Amino acid sequence: MKYEIAVVVGSLRRESLNRRLADALVQLAPSDFILTQVSIADLPLYNQDDDDHPSAAVKKLKAALAAAQGLLFVTPEYNRSIPGVLKNALDHASRPYGQNAWAGKPAGVLGVSVGAIGTALAQQHLRGMLAYLDVPTLGQPEAYIHHKEGLFDASGKLGDQSSKFLRGWMEVYVDWVKNHQDRDPSAAEGGPAKG
Ligand SMILES: Cc1cc2nc3c(=O)[nH]c(=O)nc-3n(C[C@H](O)[C@H](O)[C@H](O)COP(=O)(O)O)c2cc1C
């Protein structure tokens, strides 16, 4: 069996460190895990009036999530939370009511920032939102990555130490995603608020 993993990068920046990290994770994944970045750059600002006629970009995002067995969020921290573009994507794919495309997909959460706490607060906020969206998140190991000398080498590849840490992270994530495949999200009671 192949496992499709939808990778959501929370930065639109051309030289994004988080996208570079997401690219590096692709190299660390086993051959039965296909990691593909989903596009959130072309999503309009979420407006509930559009729920009945979603744009092509929204449909494309939701289709990619529907086809995925797992999720990987790689995000910067903006002002001690997640970037607005990531929140916008979370909102889009959570609606219309009853059609939450994130539900039940096991997710890994990582992030790199230039700040010393390495996206810890952004990840904490993201985990809270994901819990509401019925997305189970891998608790350990945590991956709060502080961008400093040696994280990436001159060619943009992961340095030795970071590569070793993330290889270990990937091994745990892979086992955990496989263990979640039998879960049926429709069995859960309740769900995101109506209206
Ligand atoms: C609007 C804005 C807010 C930021 N707030 C934080 C912050 O709260 N914590 C932090 O560690 N870094 C913060 N940064 C710095 C980011 O960590 C840094 O720009 C990082 O490179 C962004 O990720 P990216 O390279 O993937 O785009 C902020 C940057 C911007 C542009």
Image (cartoon, rainbow, N blue to C red):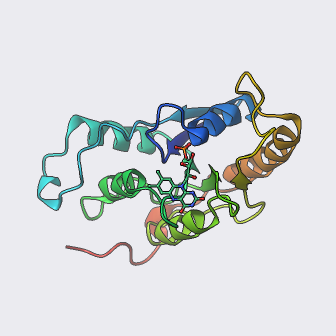
Relative placement, left or right, of 23 versus 43 is right
Q: Residue at x 42, y 44 (%)?
A: 66
User: Hey, which quadrant is residue 59 in on the image?
Assistant: top left
Q: Position of residue 195 (x, y in %)?
A: 19, 73
Q: How many marks?
A: 0
Front-lying residue, 186 or 165: 165
Q: Above or below — where is 50 with respect to 117?
A: above
- Nearer to me, 40 or 80: 80
Q: Is residue 158 above or below residue 123?
A: above
Q: Position of residue 189 (x, y in %)?
A: 43, 77
Q: Is residue 150 left or right of residue 44?
A: right
Could you say which is closer to the camera, residue 51 or residue 20? 20
Q: Is residue 154 above or below residue 96?
A: above
Q: Which image quarter holds the N terminus?
A: top right
Residue at the spot x=17%, y=60% of the render? Answer: 48
Image location of residue 39, percent across then percent down: 40, 36
Residue 2 in sight: no
Of residue 60 and residue 118, the one placed in the foreground of this image is 118
Snapshot quadrant of residue 49: bottom left
Whole-percent x, y for residue 99 in the image = 31, 57
